[in-house]
Amino acid sequence: MGVKLTAIDPTGADRDALVEFFSSQSFPFHVAADAWSTGTVMERIAVGYFLNADNAAFWLDHDEFGRVGYVRLEDLRDDTPMFDLRLSEQHRGKGLGVDALNAIAGHVFSTTRALRIEGQTREDNHAMRVVFERAGWTQEAHYRHAWPAADGVRLASVACAILREEWQAGRTLGVHWQDRPRFRPRKSAGITYASNVLPSLGELLHLYDAVGWSAYTEDPARLLRSLNGSAHVVCARVDEELVGLARIVSDFGTLVYVQDVLVDPRLQRRGIGAELIRSVLEPFDDIRQTVLLTDDDPALAAFYTSLSFTEASAAAGSSLRAFFRI
C-alpha cells in the first residue's frame, strides 16, 4: 500500500474540494495555522496559486484510506523544488508521512530534471522530522529564529533534502558537516597530509581491508556515515594513493576521542601513524581530554606512550579507569 499524487484542477472539478479542504481544518505546524476563509481559497485559485508555470497542487490518495491530504510542489522549474505538505486531520498519526514523501520524490524526479528536493519544518515538529529521517532525507540546515509562530515567538526552521542520486540508489549519502580544512595540505618525507578531504568509498574499503578491519568494510554505508560524522579526518597519500587515515569524534569543548588510525601495511613503521595523530589532534590542542582505546598489544602501547598518551589502568599506575561496552 502507498500514496500516489493526483493532479488537482483548481478552476474546474476540484474547486469546491479545495475550498472544503482548506476552510474546514487547521494545520498547527504551518506558518498560517488557522483554517482559510472561503474567500482566501477562491482568491488563491484565481491568481494561480495552485497551478501555474512553477507550481502544481496534488491530492494525496492512499490505497486503503482514500484521499488523505494535499501537497503543493513549488519552483518546479528550478534545480531544487520545494513542497507544502498537509495531511487531513483524520489521517494524521497513521504513519502516512513517509509514503507521502516517497510519492513526492518519485513524482518530482520522474517528471522534472530536479537535482534535489527540499522541505522545511519547525524545530518542534518532531513527528515531521522523524518522517524526513525515515524517508531517507537528510537534514542540511538549521535556520535559527526563522519560523514565525504564535504570540510573536520565532522558532528555528529545519531544512531537509533528498538528492536525485539518493532516490535512484535507495540510500542516503549524508553530509560531511565538519568539511572545513583545518590546515593546508602539507608534505613530509614524500607523504602528503590533507585535512577534511574525504576519500572515495572505494579508497576507504581498500585501506580498511588492507589493515584487516573487515567489521568496517562489511557495512560500507555505516563506514561512510562514520566518516561524515567525524569531527576531523586526516588522510595521508603517496602521490594520489590513499595510504593512511586518522579520524576523531568530539564535542568541540571538553573531549576528543581518537577513533581510527590506519596505515597501509606496506608503509608502516615510517612515522606516518605518528604524523596522522599529531595532525588530526592539532586543531584540538585546547581540549581537556583526549581519549582512545586500542588492542592489548605491547607495540601499540609503546607507540601511544611515545605520543604522550597515558594508560588508564591499575597495572600502569593510573588513578583513572577506562570502561567500554561492545
Image: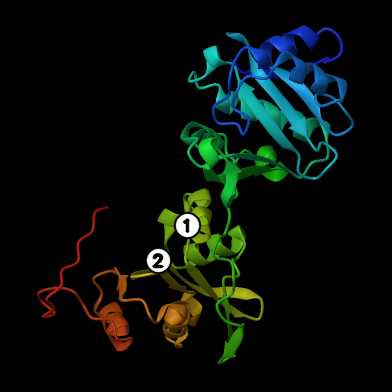
Q: Is residue 310 visible?
A: yes
Q: From the viewer's perspective, is residue 79 above or below residue 22? A: below
**Residue 237's x, y, as percent?**
59, 78
Callout 2: SS: strand
Q: Is residue 14 visible?
A: no
Residue type highlighted by circle 2:
Ser
- 241 on left or right of 264: right
Q: Residue at x 31, y 81 (%)?
A: 304
Q: Quadrant of the N terminus?
A: top right
Tell me the quarter of the picture where residue 181 sits: bottom right
Q: Give 190 or 123, whichever is nearer the viewer.
A: 123
Label 1 sits on what residue type? Ser
| Residue positioned most to the front | 151
Between residue 164 and residue 116, name the one nearer to us: 116
Any mark on residue 250, and which? 2
Q: Secondary structure at mark 1?
A: helix
Viewer-closest of 56 and 220: 56
At 33% from the left and 86% from the top, the residue drawn is 307
The disc placed on residue 254 is none
Q: Residue at x 77, y 23 (%)?
A: 57
Q: Is residue 270 above or below residue 243?
A: below
Task: Determine which residue is flagged by label 1.
Answer: 226
Q: Are marks 1 and 2 in contact (CB under 8 Å)?
A: no
* Quarter occupied by residue 30: top right
In terms of depth relative to the viewer, which is nearer, 135 or 44?
A: 44
How crowded pointer 1 is (Cα within 10 Å; few <14, some 14-19, many 20+) is rated as some
Pinpoint residue 147: horizontal percent, then vertical percent: 59, 43
**Earlier along the polypeptide chain: callout 1 or callout 2?**
1
- Is 212 left or right of 30, judged from the image as shown? left
